[in-house]
Amino acid sequence: PASAVEGKLHRTIRQVTEQVPALQYNTAIAAMMEYMNVVREGGRAARRSEVEPLVILVAPFAPHVAEELWARLGHEESVFEGGRWPPYDPDKARERTVEIAVQVNGKLRATIQGRPGMGEEDAVALAKEEENVARYLENGSVRRVIYVPDRLVNFVVG
């Protein structure tokens, strides 16, 4: 399986590749910033193989900065030469786990980890196992469960 940084790199490349033609520049830039946060997690130094694709992704947004960074990485040619937009591997870009927010009456009570595409029954069962959620569910009956796949489980308790 891909490392967390490698998986995030491939998801970032996919996001930027899809969002730039759709003129969604802010979300493309946000994806690159999130990637850098993952790279720097734990105070470790970034590897060249993790930074070079990012410099190429940044180039359309900040060409002068990208050129300077590309030169500092030891490249003689321009970052724009050679049509080197990084490809992404869909298998490595796939999320291995998702974080699902669990709410009771609209208030966040816990987050759970699950597999992408998890069904409602599995997500609700996992959510009910959380100690903080169970405490709120004991005090009333669950009137309704709102489930947004891979994002949210909300118990409406009355």
Image: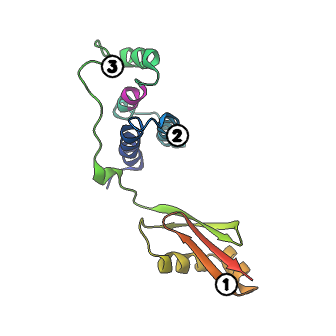
- Say what amino acid the circle numbered 1 marks: Arg
Query: Which stretch is magenta?
Result: 54-58
In the image, residue 149 lies in the stretch drawn in magenta: no
User: Disc 1 versus disc 2: distance between alpha carbons?
Assistant: 40 Å
Dot 1 corresponds to which residue?
A: 143
The image position of residue 74, as x and y in percent, is 33, 16
Horizontally, residue 125 falls left or right of residue 68, namely right
Q: Is residue 70 above or below residue 15?
A: above
Q: Dot 2: what SS?
A: helix
Dot 2 corresponds to which residue?
A: 37
- Say what amino acid the circle numbered 2 marks: Asn
Q: Are marks 3 and 1 in contact (CB under 8 Å)?
A: no
- Say what amino acid the circle numbered 3 marks: Val
Numbered mark located on residue 79 in the image: 3
Q: Name the outermost residue toward the left.
A: 82
Horizontally, residue 135 falls left or right of residue 41, namely right
Front residue of 54/39: it is 54
Q: Nearer the viewer, mark 3 or mark 1?
A: 1
User: Disc 2 versus disc 3: distance between alpha carbons?
Assistant: 23 Å
* Residue 107, quarter of picture: bottom right
The image position of residue 33, as x and y in percent, is 51, 36
**Could you classify mark 3 by the number of other residues whose Cα lies within 10 Å: few (under 14), some (14-19), or many (20 or more)?**
many
Residue shown at 73%/79% (left/top)? 136
The mark nearer the N terminus, 1 or 2, is 2
Q: Dot 1: what SS?
A: strand
* Screen quadrant of the C terminus: bottom right
The mark nearer the N terminus, 3 or 1, is 3
Q: Dot 3: what SS?
A: loop
